[in-house]
């Protein structure tokens, strides 16, 4: 057995010994990591599903072009040519004012206090336009709506632009918020794990100083504590994944009808595998950084004596 392997096995045994000697502190750190990473993971689940919901709604958005009552046949024909020339349009439905009025009366027949026998039809002819799915679909719709609005035969164009714009701004806010929460949680975890490792170091202070006196290198002393920090991060991430899985299963079961009402056919999504690996990696990295900081600071104190 070579010296590197021997050092590694000795470090692992020391790490296990440290954990056994400070079980309670180790478990508290693991649970703190699990809760913090779990909270971050739940925010990610919410963000991914809000993003999927926005995408689903965007696919259902249709552009409604209301025509002026005095539009001429030639203007109407020119408008149809504009629709046909746009390669991003998936379908176009012409809705006569008579059909629109009948559909409106059908949907409002149970409304109390709404007078439907007006003696005339207040609705205009219109076109309902759906666009093909694409990465910049919202922008295409907005640009095309602006183009149509300038047409002389068009009274107005509607597609819920204000609502879509607000929701997209909300998603940008969510991204910034997630980043901020992630940074704050990471800094908090580094502080907690660092303190835990520091307690472990001071509990074996006499032994460490003796090891250094008989020739042990600083790296040999630091490795077990760095392993301990990494194990805290790894264990905490696994517990957090179990916690997130349980919460996800509950939400998927309890809120399925609500999700169907918001976006038919949409399934509640869990965190994708790359982001799961990122959370595990982040936990391990936090454990490593925190333990390295603690051992480095301790060695600096010893060197000043």
Image (spheres, rainbow, N blue to C red):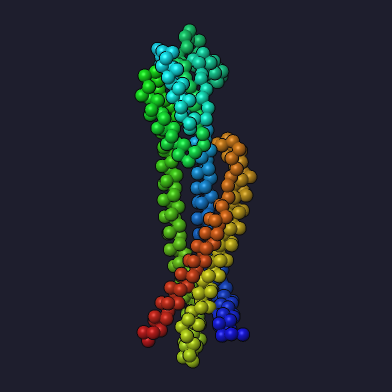
Pick the front one: 271 or 210? 271
Please tell me whether residue 141 is drawn above or below residue 251 in the rendered image: above
Please tell me whether residue 114 is drawn above or below residue 205 in the rendered image: above
Pick the front one: 280 or 63? 63
Q: Name which residue lies at 51% across and 76% down.
A: 225
Q: Position of residue 155 (x, y in %)?
A: 39, 20
Q: Name which residue lies at 47% across and 64% down.
A: 189
Q: Position of residue 180 (x, y in %)?
A: 42, 55
Q: Position of residue 119 (x, y in %)?
A: 48, 7
Q: Name which residue lies at 53% across and 52% down.
A: 42
Quarter where residue 3 is shown: bottom right
Quarter where residue 162 is shown: top left
Q: Is residue 80 visible?
A: yes
Q: Is residue 17 visible?
A: no
Furthest residue in direction bottom, as rendered? 214
- For residue 257, side relative to residue 116 (left or right): right
Q: Name which residue lies at 38% across and 25% down.
A: 149
Pick the front one: 236 or 202? 236
Q: Position of residue 10 (x, y in %)?
A: 57, 82
Pick the front one: 80 or 118? 80
């Amino acid at each position: 057995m070579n010296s590197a392997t021997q050092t590694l096995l000795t470090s692992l045994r020391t790490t296990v010994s440290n954990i056994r000697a400070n079980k309670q502190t180790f478990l508290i750190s693991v649970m703190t990591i699990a809760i913090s990473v779990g909270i971050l993971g739940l925010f990610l689940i919410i963000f991914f599903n809000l993003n999927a919901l926005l995408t689903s709604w965007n696919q259902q958005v249709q552009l409604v072009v209301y025509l002026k009552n005095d539009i001429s046949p030639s203007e109407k024909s020119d408008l149809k040519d504009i629709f046909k020339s746009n390669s991003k349009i998936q379908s176009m439905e012409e809705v006569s004012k008579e059909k629109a009025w009948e559909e409106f009366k059908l949907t409002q027949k149970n409304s109390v206090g709404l007078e439907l026998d007006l003696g005339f039809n207040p609705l205009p002819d219109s076109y309902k336009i759906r666009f093909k799915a694409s990465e910049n679909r919202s922008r295409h719709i907005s640009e095309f709506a602006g183009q149509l609005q300038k047409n002389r035969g068009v009274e107005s164009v509607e597609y819920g632009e204000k609502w879509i714009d607000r929701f997209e701004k909300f998603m940008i806010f969510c991204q910034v918020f997630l980043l901020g929460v992630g940074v704050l949680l990471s800094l908090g975890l580094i502080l907690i794990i660092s303190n835990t490792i520091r307690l472990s170091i001071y509990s074996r202070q006499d032994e460490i100083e003796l090891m250094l006196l008989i020739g042990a290198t600083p790296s040999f002393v630091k490795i077990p504590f760095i392993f301990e920090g990494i194990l805290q991060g790894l264990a905490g991430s696994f517990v957090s994944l179990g916690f997130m899985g349980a919460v996800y299963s509950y939400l998927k079961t309890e809120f399925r009808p609500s999700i169907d009402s918001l976006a038919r056919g949409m399934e509640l999504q869990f965190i994708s595998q790359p982001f799961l690996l990122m959370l595990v990696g982040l936990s391990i990295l936090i454990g490593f950084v925190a333990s390295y900081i603690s051992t480095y600071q301790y060695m600096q104190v010893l060197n000043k004596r």
